[in-house]
Image: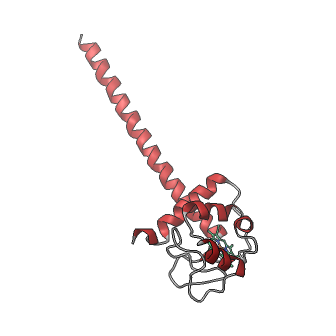
Amino acid sequence: MRLSHFRIFAFAAVLAVCAAQAASQEEAKTVDAVSAGEALFNKRCAQCHSLVAGKNGKGPSLFRIVGREAAVVPGFKYSRALRRMAADESLKWSEENLTAFLTRPSLLVPGTRMAFPGVKKEEDLTKLVAWIKANSGPSPDDS
Ligand code: HEC
């Protein structure tokens, strides 16, 4: 009798440890996804873009990019193609449009000046967009 109680207790303890491990693995995955997004940004975007307001490089500042209108950064000389799309189609950088643009910029905006072939792996794109969303300041939609 005593032994079987002990067994049940031991079994429960093992289950609890497994659950705790699974939870911390989930957390580790989230952290990995975020740092993967940051690494991708640094490797593929940072040479032309900053996330700091008003800081333009070869490309415009991406401060508050998620949810904002295209081609509105002051002092940046956008291509005619992007300005046209912004004016004629009220192009906004929703997560969906941003993902489409970064898959292949010239496909969404033929004639864009952004000389970038695109992010090929869907998994990388998801991580990159999530990281940009979390690190580019509050979305214009939130204010
Ligand atoms: C070689 C330089 C270069 C690289 C690398 C680059 N971009 Fe760009 N980006 C530009 C330029 C130039 C423009 C302006 C495009 C135009 O006017 O057609 C632009 C425009 C954009 C826009 C539209 C901004 C707005 O204000 O409407 C977004 C969003 C963007 N880039 C995101 C990215 C991201 C994310 C990456 C990395 C995956 C990246 N870019 C890589 C040069 C670059």
Colour setting: secondary structure
Name the residue at the front extreme.
88
* x and y percentages locating residue 18 in the rendered image: 41, 34
Name the residue at the top extreme.
1
Q: Name the image quarter holding the C terminus.
A: bottom left
Q: Is residue 116 above or below residue 34?
A: below
Could you say which quadrant of the image residue 3 lies in?
Answer: top left
Q: Relative to 82, is 55 on the left or the right?
A: left
Identify the residue at image location x=53%, y=72%.
65
Q: Is residue 108 above or below residue 52?
A: above
Identify the residue at image location x=44%, y=49%.
27
Nearer to us in this view, 94 or 49? 94
* x and y percentages locating residue 41 in the rendered image: 60, 67
Nearer to us in this view, 103 or 110? 110
Q: Name the image quarter holding the N terminus.
A: top left
Identify the residue at image location x=57%, y=81%.
72
Name the residue at the left extreme.
2
* x and y percentages locating residue 69 in the rendered image: 55, 74
Q: Is residue 136 above or below residue 56?
A: above
Nearer to us in this view, 108 or 76? 108
* x and y percentages locating residue 97 in the rendered image: 60, 63
Q: Relative to 43, is 18 on the left or the right?
A: left
Q: Relative to 42, is 138 on the left or the right?
A: left
Q: How many marks?
A: 0
Nearer to us in this view, 124 or 18? 124
Which quadrant of the figure shows ligand 1? bottom right
